[in-house]
């Protein structure tokens, strides 16, 4: 009997060996990143190394990166209390905070009327449609595009972005909110002052280390053309489907 082949990478990607190695190494960091003694500083160094790795992979140098439990928590931090507009094609974690007054066109694209008061995903996990991100967009869900598309937060034009580790081969349960300097958010978890007061709670050092390593490896794969190879395989599959089903619709502008 042939073995199973796992293809549901948009839901969660297999853990990268680089992430696994970084997490195992981080398990030996006994200190609390908020402590000022040597053990605490060693743990803090792992957190800040990962922050730099993620910023480089995202093209977000100079932006602020707030570690969260995942992109869903990052969405809550970014969207809560802002009364943003959006569409029903957004992931539920984002759509839950939006006024779904925007409608996608026949190709699945959405044009925000008021970018500074809107949220829009970079790429859709089901259709692969890539959106054109308008300058000044309030929130961009970058989760499905990060590590797969040659984009950079610094030139996307959005104010805040959401990313998750397990979509790029990192561990589950860790993500980040990426913010342009000067953006203001209201902390939802308070009390410890971590993440510059934006998200209290002792940092998940092991998960953060794995996230950083996965981001670095994903960026290297993108640079090496790994996703171009996958696009070729997709085209082969589409051609085979088209030969056998003449009513199939292929979406233009996919990831």
Image: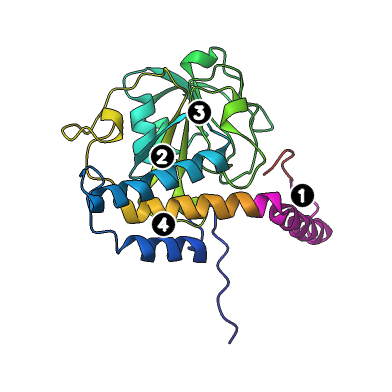
**Residue occupying the point 43% across, 42% down:** 51
Residue 246 covered by magenta stretch: yes
Q: Label 1 belongs to which residue?
A: 247
Q: CA distance from mark 4 to mark 3?
A: 25 Å
Where, by quadrant of the figure, is residue 59 drawn? top right
Q: Quadrant of the N terminus?
A: bottom right
Where, by quadrant of the figure, is residue 237 drawn? bottom right
- Ranked by sequence position, the earlier of labels 3 and 1 is 3
Q: Quadrant of the C terminus?
A: top right
- Ranked by sequence position, the earlier of labels 4 and 3 is 3
Q: 10 Å neighbourhood of mark 2: few (<14), some, or many (≥20)? A: many
Q: Nearest to the eye among marks 1 and 2: give it.
A: 2
* Residue nearer the viewer, 211 or 138: 211
Q: Furthest residue to the front?
A: 38
Magenta segment, which residues?
A: 221-249
Q: Label 2 belongs to which residue?
A: 176
Q: Label 3 belongs to which residue?
A: 62
Q: CA distance from mark 4 to mark 2?
A: 13 Å
Q: 10 Å neighbourhood of mark 1: few (<14), some, or many (≥20)? A: few
Q: Is residue 142 left or right of residue 205?
A: right
- Ranked by sequence position, the earlier of labels 2 and 3 is 3
Q: Furthest residue to the left?
A: 191
Coordinates of residue 147 in the picture (x, y in percent): 59, 47
**Residue occupying the point 56% across, 31% down:** 153
Q: Nearest to the eye among marks 4 and 3: give it.
A: 3
């Amino acid at each position: 009997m042939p073995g199973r082949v796992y293809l549901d990478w948009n839901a969660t990607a297999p853990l990268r060996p680089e992430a696994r190695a970084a997490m195992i190494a981080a398990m030996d960091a006994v200190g609390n990143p908020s402590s000022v003694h040597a053990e605490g500083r060693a743990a803090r160094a792992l957190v800040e190394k990962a922050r730099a790795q993620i910023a480089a992979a995202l093209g977000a140098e100079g932006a602020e990166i707030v570690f969260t439990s995942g992109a869903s928590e990052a969405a809550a931090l970014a969207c809560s209390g802002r009364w943003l507009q959006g569409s029903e094609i957004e992931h539920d974690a984002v759509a839950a905070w939006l006024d779904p007054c925007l409608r996608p066109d026949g190709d699945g694209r959405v044009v925000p009327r008021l970018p500074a008061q809107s949220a829009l995903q970079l790429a859709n996990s089901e259709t692969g449609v890539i959106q054109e991100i308008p300058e000044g967009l309030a929130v961009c869900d970058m989760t499905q595009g990060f590590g797969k598309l040659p984009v950079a937060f610094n030139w996307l034009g959005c104010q805040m972005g959401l990313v998750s580790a397990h979509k790029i081969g990192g561990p589950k349960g860790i993500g980040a909110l990426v913010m342009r300097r000067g953006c203001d958010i209201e902390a939802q978890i308070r009390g410890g002052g971590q993440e510059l007061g934006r998200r209290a709670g002792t940092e998940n050092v092991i998960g953060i280390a794995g996230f950083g390593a996965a981001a670095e490896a994903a960026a290297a794969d993108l640079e090496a053309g790994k996703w171009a190879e996958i696009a070729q395989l997709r085209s082969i599959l589409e051609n085979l489907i088209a030969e056998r089903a003449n009513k199939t619709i292929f979406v233009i502008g996919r990831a």
